[in-house]
Image (spheres, helix red, strand yellow):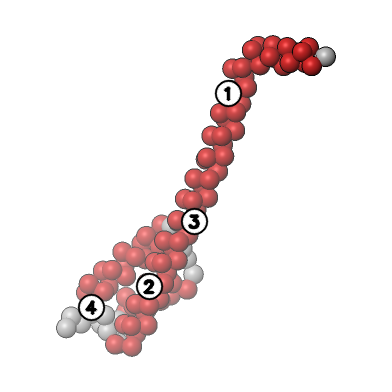
């Protein structure tokens, strides 16, 4: 019986090897895509969190000074633009709007 089972299995593999190879390849590819998507999402959220932190830190710095430098304002605007492009919103918008009202003073 073992020989018959082995023969049937070998015949099945020989007949359907392309389908088996294709389905295995698709499964591996889907697992890779899922992993890459998770990494992309993590990187996106990580960069968004870093930009948010830098904008908030800058807010407290320039609020304490009661003025902002030209380079500081340019950096805030660039960070905020990318923060928004990554889907960020909320409190940061209010902080950036406040920073834009500060007097620009270069030391």
Q: Secondary structure at mark 2?
A: helix
For disc 2, the neighbor class at 10 Å (few under 14, some 14 to 19, many from 20) is many
Looking at the image, can residue 60 be seen?
A: yes
Q: Name which of mark 4 and mark 3 comes first in the sequence.
A: 3
Q: Quarter holding the N terminus?
A: top right
Q: Secondary structure at mark 4?
A: loop
Between discs 4 and 2, the one toward the N terminus: 2
Measured in 3D between alpha carbons, the distance from the residue under mark 4 to the one under mark 3, in whole angstroms, is: 33 Å
- Name the residue carrying label 4: 69
Q: Earlier in the sequence, mark 1 or mark 4?
A: 1
At x 41% / y 72%, what residue is drawn? 53
- N-terminal of the pair, mark 3 or mark 2, is 3
Which residue in the rendered view is the most extreme toward the front? 2
Residue tagged 1:
22
Reading the image, the residue beneath label 3 is 42
- State whether residue 22 is above or below residue 88: above
Q: CA distance from mark 3 to mark 2?
A: 20 Å
Answer left or right for 89 relative to 27.
left
- Are there few (<14), some (14-19), or many (20+) residues within 10 Å of tag 3? few
Q: Are marks 3 and 2 in contact (CB under 8 Å)?
A: no
Read off the residue under disc 2. 55
Say which label, 2 or 1, has the lower sequence index: 1
Could you say which is closer to the camera, residue 27 or residue 73? 27
Quadrant of the image for the C terminus?
bottom left
């Amino acid at each position: 019986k073992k020989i018959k089972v082995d023969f049937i299995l070998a015949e099945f593999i020989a007949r359907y090897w392309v389908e088996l190879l294709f389905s295995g390849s698709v499964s591996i590819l889907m697992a890779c895509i899922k992993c890459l998507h998770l990494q992309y999402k993590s990187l996106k959220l990580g960069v968004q969190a870093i930009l948010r932190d830098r904008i908030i830190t800058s807010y407290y710095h320039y609020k304490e000074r009661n003025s902002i430098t030209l380079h500081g304002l340019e950096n805030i605007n660039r960070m905020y633009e990318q923060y928004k492009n990554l889907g960020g919103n909320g409190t940061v918008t209010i902080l950036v709007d406040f920073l834009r009202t500060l007097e620009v003073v270069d030391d």
